Image (cartoon, helix red, strand yellow):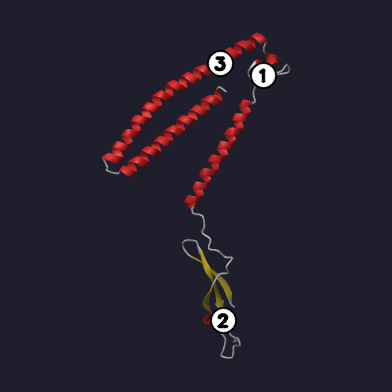
């Protein structure tokens, strides 16, 4: 054999292996030839790939970007759980602290009591704000999703496209509202 060659198609799929085979004379003996004659007498003979060589498709750039987006989203969610646990570990109520707590070392019991009142007022205010804001958001999202469907589904006579665009808008809007709700709840935990 003169050498081996792996064939790769433009779709990046390994199709098989070809081997350069040298010609031999009529007796089956290899001829002693110069390198130029060997080059001239050699030809490519396709061989079947062994069974354990399954065709392998290379990952496209679009797939790599998708993996990056999903992977970074998972890392971000795990980091947010870590931060939530860190915030949750801070004790604010006097009943939850012990005698050696930093709050007890810095504040008197009257100051701690007033801090708890202020803390509860902030939490109640945040809840009231979210309720007022989300009433308006739900009204806007409902009306605007109908407008989206009307413009795409009805006027352009693309009902499937209009419905898909409306659903994408609704998912984005509700995901955004859920993120705001979770963020506010963590802020006033």
User: Do the numbered discs 1 and 3 sit on residues whose CB atoms are within 8 Å?
Assistant: no
Q: Which residue is mark 2?
A: 22
Q: Which residue is mark 3?
A: 120
Q: Using a 10 Å C-alpha cutoff, classify the residue at mark 3 as few (fewer than 14 neighbours), some (14 to 19) or many (20 or more).
A: few
Where residue 31 sits: x, y (%)?
Answer: 59, 87
Residue 78 in the image: above or below residue 132: below
Quarter in which the N terminus is drawn: bottom right
Where residue 107 sits: x, y (%)?
Answer: 67, 12
Quarter in which the C terminus is drawn: top right
Residue reaching furthest to the top: 110
User: Image point 53% across, 14% down: which residue?
Assistant: 121
Where residue 18 sits: x, y (%)?
Answer: 54, 73
> Element at badge 1?
helix
First reached walking from the N terminus: tag 1 or tag 2 = 2
Q: Which residue is mark 1?
A: 96
- Between 84 and 164, the one lying in front of the other is 164
Residue 6 in the image: above or below residue 31: above
Q: Nearer the viewer, mark 2 or mark 3?
A: 3
First reached walking from the N terminus: tag 1 or tag 3 = 1
Q: Which mark is residue 46?
A: none
Q: Is residue 104 left or right of residue 174?
A: right
User: Image point 47% across, 18% down: which residue?
Assistant: 128
Q: Using a 10 Å C-alpha cutoff, classify the residue at mark 2 as few (fewer than 14 neighbours), some (14 to 19) or many (20 or more).
A: some
Quadrant of the rendered image containing residue 154: top left
User: Do the numbered discs 2 and 3 sit on residues whose CB atoms are within 8 Å?
Assistant: no
> Element at badge 3?
helix
- Between 147 and 104, the one lying in front of the other is 147
User: Image point 68% across, 18% down: which residue?
Assistant: 97
């Amino acid at each position: 054999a003169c050498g081996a060659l792996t064939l790769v198609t433009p779709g990046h799929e390994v199709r098989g292996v070809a081997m350069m085979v040298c010609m031999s004379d009529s007796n089956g003996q290899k001829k002693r030839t110069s390198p130029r004659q060997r080059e001239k007498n050699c030809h490519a003979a396709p061989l079947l790939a062994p069974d354990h060589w399954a065709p392998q498709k290379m990952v496209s750039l679009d797939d790599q970007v998708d993996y990056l987006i999903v992977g970074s989203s998972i890392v971000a969610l795990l980091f947010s759980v870590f931060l939530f646990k860190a915030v949750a570990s801070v004790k604010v109520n006097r009943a939850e602290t012990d005698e050696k707590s930093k709050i007890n070392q810095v504040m008197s019991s009257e100051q701690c009591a007033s801090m708890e009142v202020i803390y509860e007022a902030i939490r109640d205010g945040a809840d009231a704000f979210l309720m007022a804001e989300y009433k308006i958001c739900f009204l806007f999202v409902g009306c605007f999703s109908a407008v989206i469907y009307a413009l795409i589904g009805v006027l352009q006579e693309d009902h499937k496209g209009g419905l898909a665009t409306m659903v994408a808008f609704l998912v984005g809007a509700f995901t955004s509202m859920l993120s705001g709700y979770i963020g506010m709840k963590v802020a006033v935990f």
